[in-house]
Image (cartoon, coloured by chain):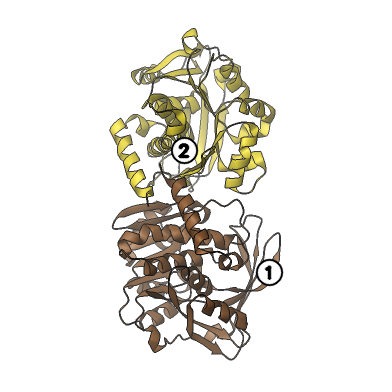
Chain colours: A brown, B yellow
Amino acid sequence: MSILVVGSIALDTINTQKASNKQLLGGSASHAAVAASFFSKVNLVGILGKDFPKRHLKLFNDRGINTEGLEIAPGKTFRWECQYEEDMNKRQTLSTDLGVFADFSPELPKTYIDTQYVLLANIAPALQLQVLDQVKKPRLVVADTMDLWLNTALPDLKKLLKKVDVFVLNDGEAMQLTGEDNVISAAKKTHKFGPKQVIVKKGEHGSILSGPDGLFIAPAFPLLKVVDPTGAGDSFAGAMVGYLAGTKGGIRNNLKKSVVYGSVVASFCCEGFGMKKTVATSSADIQKRFNLLKKSAQF
Amino acid sequence: MSILVVGSIALDTINTQKASNKQLLGGSASHAAVAASFFSKVNLVGILGKDFPKRHLKLFNDRGINTEGLEIAPGKTFRWECQYEEDMNKRQTLSTDLGVFADFSPELPKTYIDTQYVLLANIAPALQLQVLDQVKKPRLVVADTMDLWLNTALPDLKKLLKKVDVFVLNDGEAMQLTGEDNVISAAKKTHKFGPKQVIVKKGEHGSILSGPDGLFIAPAFPLLKVVDPTGAGDSFAGAMVGYLAGTKGGIRNNLKKSVVYGSVVASFCCEGFGMKKTVATSSADIQKRFNLLKKSAQF
């Protein structure tokens, strides 16, 4: 099965304490689509400017990512620059230039509207809603978000959450949304906004899936070194939904494994700037890490 | 098999944002011994003052904890007072009164020197060494520590670590000891100080066991509410060594499970002030949580 991915497509400039990399392919939808493409075909929705390098479009197409839903608008592609601190869990945004993204009003091509698996990667909840409303009969709706929307678009987010099956957010966001000071109680309280399944991401500490089958405590893949964590959360969500769409056996049966595949693909993302390491990774590399993680978590 | 536990025995006053509790039974050895007593007999070593409440000694004895190795000295029992912040991972020490602990020079009773499982709970490394040197032929030596000894007694700690099989420390300590900024690489680098097995505790995020069989990523038991985390790390180590001493099948085979039992007993410790909840817990409660944690971590 295919998955539909909507989100941002950006050119990122990323500075760490050790290196700087300019105009990398980035944005929530790019990371999520590439991560999903290990497991399923992808219908990508987004907007980009005339300046968007052709080689990035080729990369999408070479990976089975359908770019028919990408609008190429006059103007510049969304650009974002950040600076990571010594502690890579902390970063500052240095500049944001929305470019054509400022007027993004997603319209799905007809070939997309029957897609059954929908990943609303991190963008404004109003845009996520606009896309979701165009999908005919979604079988699984997964949404990611960020603290910005909790602060500036909470009513939209709450409206969206009523239509979401799996909601992905990080620990700080879950605590902000629910007012809880404990991740577990925050995860549980998030259900009251609508989603039956809630996944709270804890970065290097793994993630917690809360749902009708109880809690699943998912490990992160243990990395000796993080080069650039940008896009790890988007890769996590992309791989997770891609795995569910590409694997037989039913969503509920495969959900735990999908979270672990999400962790694994996110771990590759962290090992290179932008998605440099992700695109150099093979399905066999992913399976090897999945097996190792399974062995490391068993008792 | 019995385990030998040495460490501090204290009367703790613990203040959280919600309540204050005075003169609770505390100290690394008390927490570790009580946690171990779910699984094995314990030979306890420590010092206390004439003011130490008899009911605490009775509690030890009722749980199969041998108190022959407790020295009752003229003077006051070690007292410690702390204040937890809103974020329970942060606390301030308000006062420390060493009392008789200042002159502690542990001497093992003859009945203790053949104990095969040794837990050197958190006290000065020189005292840990002094005890270890009196044990005839230890089969397993486990040591815990704290940042204070990294800052003030590093040469002693390094001397001790050459004789330790399993070293337990928290993530911040592991990074401080090794100079690494990543928990996984810090765990791996800690082996060079001697211990074949290193356990890095990450509080609510579980722990990492690094050893000849690779990494084991152990989950913490998910708690909805933490009342008082004091002693959780000591309980973790105590339950771990107690389980190893009390279970057939060999140390290496049981090590992963021992870490999970450590997490489980630590979770009970966190749910009450001091060890109030721990002592109200049954072996069946522990097994139930172990089974639930196993189910929550499987995929």
Q: Nearer the viewer, residue A115 or B69?
A: A115
Q: Is residue A298 above or below residue A12?
A: above
Q: Nearer the viewer, residue A21 or B105?
A: A21
One can see residue B38 in this view = yes
Q: Position of residue B114 (x, y in %)?
A: 49, 13
Q: Quadrant of residue A241?
A: bottom left
Q: Is residue B94 above or below residue B204?
A: above
Q: Amino acid at mark 1?
A: Asn
Q: What residue is drawn where x is 43% and y is 75%? A: A41
Residue underneath mark 1: A21
User: How far is disc 1 from disc 2 in space, using C-alphas?
Assistant: 48 Å
Say what secondary structure mark 2 lies in.
Answer: strand
Q: Quadrant of the C terminus of chain A?
A: top left
Q: Is residue A53 above or below residue B151?
A: below
Neighbour tally class for label 1: few under 14, some 14-19, many 20 plus, Cα within 10 Å: few
Tell whether label 2 touches label 1 (CB within 8 Å): no
Neighbour tally class for label 2: few under 14, some 14-19, many 20 plus, Cα within 10 Å: many
Q: Position of residue A214 (x, y in %)?
A: 31, 53
Label 1 chain ID: A
Say what secondary structure mark 1 lies in.
Answer: strand
Label 2 chain ID: B
- The lab-note entry on whether marks 1 and 2 share a chain reads no
Residue underneath mark 2: B15
Q: Nearer the viewer, residue A199 or B212?
A: B212
Q: Position of residue A200 (x, y in %)?
A: 43, 59
Q: Position of residue A287 (x, y in %)?
A: 47, 58
One can see residue A202 in this view = no
Residue with the most extreme front position = A284
Q: Is residue B91 above or below residue B56?
A: below
Closer to viewer: mark 1 or mark 2: 1
Q: Quadrant of the N terminus of chain A?
A: bottom left
